[in-house]
Amino acid sequence: MYTDNHNHTKHFSSDARMSAQELIDTCRSLKMNGVAVTEHYEGDYPHDIGVPQIFDISSFFAESSSWLEYAGDFHLYRGIELGYQKHLCSFYDDMIAKYPFDSVILSNHLYRGKDPYFFRDCYDEDMITVYTRYIEEMADMVEGCKNFDIVGHFDYINRYAPYPAPQIKYDQCPESFDRFLSSIVAKGKSLEINTRSVDKMRRKGIDDCMPDPTILKRYYDLGGRWISLGSDSHDKDTLCIHFKEVAEYLHSFGFTENSYYVKRQRFGEPLV
Ligand SMILES: [Zn+2]
Ligand SMILES: [Zn+2]
């Protein structure tokens, strides 16, 4: 089985319902290789949703030391999911350097400064315009920040999209994808394949739910080899969801490893 690189617990992520104990127990019973806890840290989150979107990192390390004890010989990694905004890059780079994280996911939950989860009006524009601008913002993110390992869910923008065929595709904005994917390769980062996105599409009854083959081929052709699987679980019942199916799919494009991180060092485990 695999390492799941992207998960949230209720202790530090306000939208999660799973406890650390449930996370560890479930991963252990699924015979997974390991699991990373990556709580949300959204500096200057633009919406007031009644609960803070950042947490005290020292408290996280203090509290999670008991989770490591509970996990025993099971591999539990302590990561974080940073919410990108352009003006936060150097703040994040400095902040991350101060703590002993295993892995750092950098994600973009905003489109033109608003989270599409709350503001569906961002989809008032046509699909090509929205997706092109989102991928441009993702490229800005990868180019602008330094201290991270994994580029989170490049397909976040299509999770809540109302378009009839919402899957994001290379051919919708090839120049932007080239800029985005080349910057990941140039910086030696890992492209996350987020299986929560696959699951969300499938639950909506959309058959075309796997990541676009052309995006994956282009990443590979540009030299991209590092892929990280993440279920982005907020509940225990979605841990490593669709991993086997997605791993076999990725393998068919030439990718051989699921990348995971220990003390910010990359390791690979076989995809099949
Ligand atoms: Zn996210
Ligand atoms: Zn997440």
Image: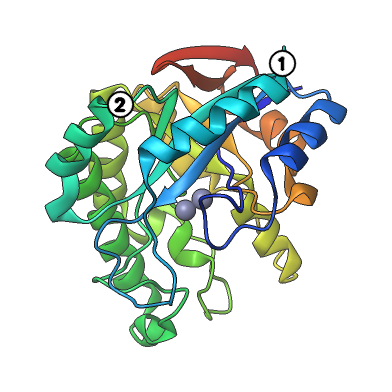
The structure residue drawn at horizontal position 27% and vertical position 56%, both measured from the top left corner, is 43
* Relative to 10, 148 lies left or right: left
Disc 1 beta carbon < 8 A from ligand 2?
no
Under tag 1, what secondary structure? loop
Tell us which disc is closer to us: 2 or 1.
1
The residue to which callout 2 is attached is 185
When the figure is inspected, residue 260 is found, relative to residue 111, above or below; the finding is: above
Q: Amino acid at mark 2?
A: Val
* Relative to 186, 269 lies left or right: right
Nearest to N terminus: mark 2 or mark 1:
1
The structure residue drawn at horizontal position 73% and vertical position 61%, both measured from the top left corner, is 202
Under tag 2, what secondary structure? helix
The residue to which callout 1 is attached is 72
Q: Give x and y (percent) for residue 19.
A: 69, 47
Q: Quadrant of the C terminus?
A: top right
| Quadrant of the image occupied by residue 263 | top left
* Relative to 240, 122 lies left or right: left
